[in-house]
Amino acid sequence: MSATPGAASNVGFIGLGKMGLPMATCLLAGGHSVMAHDSRAKATETLRGKPRLSVAADAATLAAARDIIVLMLPTSAVIRHVMQEGGLLAALRPGTLVIDMGSSVPAETRSLAAEIAARGGQLVDAPVSGSVAKALTGTLAIMAGGDDAAIDRAMPVLSCMGEKVIRTGPVGSAHAMKALNNFVYAAGLLASIEAVRMGERLGLDLAVLTDVMNASSGRNVATETKLKQHILNGGYSAGFQIGLQRKDLETAGAIAAETGFDARSLALCRHIWTEAVEALGPAADNTELHRHLR
């Protein structure tokens, strides 16, 4: 997607992983000037030589040179490290807008927003939903939490990376909704896999069982886009690591702890995904939960 006409800006981007790299590339394609940083020196090599790109040696250098900074980092703990030990927070200039597009813990997001506000900046939490393929084409779904004026300022940046931006409320709300959504997805995937495993033992035609679920009340994103496409054929290549799913479930668990709600099905999902990560390794595809539940 392209940036809003006349809205190209100078953006800092930290975190060039599987999602971050194509997202930063979309910003460049949208006309933005991007200063990139990643703790792994090789991560920036793919971008080198592209127009309007510069590379920062560290997070503090980037913060001192950019008024809009995108973070695409894996956890709140990593963000805290970059902010503190990496010097990002101390180097922030008044008026800086920080956009956290990772899957952070909402309570940590609110705490970080207060620290950034104390330095005269603002935080928008803008986690994404979608695969690497959607990141490559700039068609992610993006949730955005924070002050309306701050989100308005972020929109020319966000619109390069996503085709739909949903405003979720105050800062931290987007990270909360992302975690709760991913819990519901995980629960649906688990139920779908258990259903086909039981159907297998009964000798049922699993393709027909999938058709029945998709035509009936059991339909969910797992039955529609995972069973035939990635599980029943043994391909296990949906493109989302099982360790990342476990991380999202742990974030949802932090919400349960914060709210004092006894989320028993969430606890079960967390237990089963932890078992699967220990058995298969965190880099296994999420659909390989089917292999684990033999």
Image: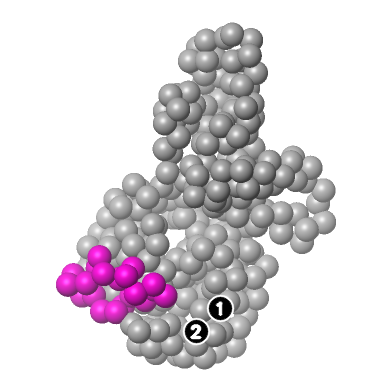
* Residue at horizontal 47 percent and vertical 46 percent from the top: 240
Q: Is residue 214 magenta?
A: no
Quadrant of the frame with the C terminus: top right
Distance from Cα at disc 1 to Cα at disc 2? 6 Å
In the picture, the quarter occupied by the N terminus is: bottom left
Does 270 sit above or below residue 156?
A: above
Q: Which residues are magenta?
A: 35-55
For residue 96, which numbered disc appears in the image? Answer: none
Would you say 4 lies left or right of 231 here?
left
**Residue 32 on image: x %, y %:** 26, 71
| Amino acid type, callout 2 | Gly
Q: Nearer the viewer, residue 142 or 195?
A: 195
Q: Position of residue 242 (x, y in %)?
A: 54, 46
What residue is shown with label 1?
81
* Mark 1 crowdedness (10 Å alpha carbons): few <14, some 14-19, many ≥20: few
Q: Residue furthest front?
A: 279
Which residue is denoted by mark 2 in the rendering? 86
Helix, strand or loop at mark 2: loop
Task: Name the residue at 50% across, 44% down.
Answer: 284
> Does residue 236 appear left or right of residue 265 in this picture?
left
Tell me which amino acid carries mark 1. His
